[in-house]
Amino acid sequence: VPSFLEFADQLEVFIPGYMLVFTRLSAMLMTLPIFSYPMISGRTRVMLAFVLTVIVGSILNMETIPPVTNLWMLTGLMAKE
């Protein structure tokens, strides 16, 4: 049975990876012509980005992401996306 500390260590790897995927997908959905119409609400775009993040994030190898040691590093990585 994995302990809570092992689970917390895994979260340190997965959460930044999922945040980077979410950043890229949400930016893509906001700029695509089909999704930028006013008829499609922002909430719908965010939910679609979230669902796609879960799907794409489960396929990707999150271990290739550099370890994030602080919030500024994560912000820099998100800006690069």
Image (cartoon, rainbow, N blue to C red):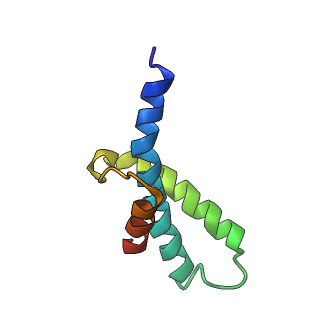
Q: Assign the N terminus to one quadrant of the image.
A: top left
Residue 42: x %, y % from top left = 69, 73
Q: Is residue 44 left or right of residue 51?
A: right
Residue drawn where x is 34% and y is 47% of the image: 62
Dividing the picture into quarters, in which one does residue 10 lie?
top left
Residue 18: x %, y % from top left = 46, 53
Residue drawn where x is 44% and y is 63% of the image: 72
Dividing the picture into quarters, in which one does residue 58 lie?
top left
Q: Assign the C terminus to one quadrant of the image.
A: bottom left
Residue drawn where x is 26% and y is 50% of the image: 64
State the residue in front, 70 or 44: 70
Residue 69 in the image: above or below residue 36: above
Residue 43: x %, y % from top left = 70, 67
State the residue in front, 64 or 42: 64
Q: Is residue 2 left or right of residue 66?
A: right
Residue drawn where x is 57% and y is 57% of the image: 50
Residue 34 in the image: above or below residue 15: below
